Amino acid sequence: GSRGEASRYMALQCAKDIGSPGNPASQGEIVRLAREYERAFPKGERLQLVLADRARAHFNRKEWDDAADSALESGRIATDPAARRTAFRIAGEARFEAGRYPEAERAFRGILAASPTPAEQADVEKWVGFAMFRTAERLPPGRDAGTLFLRIPREFPSLEIVPEARFRA
C-alpha cells in the first residue's frame, strides 16, 4: 500500500541525506534502493523522483548510459517542466560524457522544448552547439561535416564556437 511506498521512498531519501556524491558505495546504495522502489511500485506516485535520484547516483558513479536512461525515463513521465528540464540535463550531460554527442544534442533540445528560463536557455544552447560541434568532428570521411558545422552559427549565432565552426565548414 501507500505506507509501504512511503517507507521505501523515505529509505531512499535517507540514503541520499547521508551519502556523498563522491562516494561510489553510497551512490550504489541509492541505486539499489531506487531499483527496489521501482520494482515494488512500477506506477508509484514518486516514480519520477526516484528515477531522477537514480540517474544522479549513476552520474556520480560515472555510469553514463544508466544515468542517461534513468534520466530520460524520468523526463518522459515528469509533469512539471522544471523536473523535465532537470532530467533531460542529466541525460544530456551523461550522453556528452560518454561521447554520444547526437544523443546528447537530442536530450539538450528536450530542455529547450520544456520552457527554460532565459539564463538556462543560453546555457543549454551552448551545450547543443558543443554537441553538434563534437558530432561534426567525429563524422567519418565522406560524410558532410561542413553542413553540420554551418548549422551551428545559423541556429546559435552568439556561441563562442561559431568562428571555429565556420572555419571548419
Image (spheres, rainbow, N blue to C red):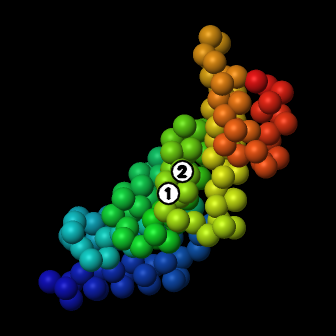
User: How would you rate the neighbour count of disc 2 (Cα within 10 Å): few for under 14, some for 14-19, many for 20 or more?
Assistant: many
Residue drawn at (27%, 66%), measured in percent from left and top? 38
Residue 70, position as x, y percentages in the image: 40, 57
User: How would you rate the neighbour count of disc 1 (Cα within 10 Å): few for under 14, some for 14-19, many for 20 or more?
Assistant: few
Q: In this orientation, does residue 6 appear? A: yes
Q: Amino acid at mark 1?
A: Ala
Q: In the rendering, which numbered label is found on residue 76?
A: none
Q: In this orientation, does residue 31 appear? A: no
Q: Is residue 159 above or below residue 51?
A: above
Q: Amino acid at mark 2?
A: Arg
Residue annotated with mark 1: 113
Q: Nearer the viewer, residue 97 or 132?
A: 132
Residue 124, position as x, y percentages in the image: 64, 56
Q: Is residue 19 above or below residue 98?
A: below
Q: Nearer the viewer, residue 32 or 139?
A: 139
Where's the N terminus, which quadrant? bottom left
Q: Nearer the viewer, residue 161 or 13?
A: 161
SS at badge 1: loop
Q: In the displayed image of the protein, which residue is found farthest to the bottom?
A: 3
Q: Is residue 161 above or below residue 80?
A: above
Residue 58, position as x, y percentages in the image: 49, 58
SS at badge 2: helix
Q: Are marks 2 and 1 in contact (CB under 8 Å)?
A: yes
Residue 54, position as x, y percentages in the image: 43, 65
Where's the C terminus, which quadrant? top right
Residue 139 quadrant: top right
Residue annotated with mark 2: 109
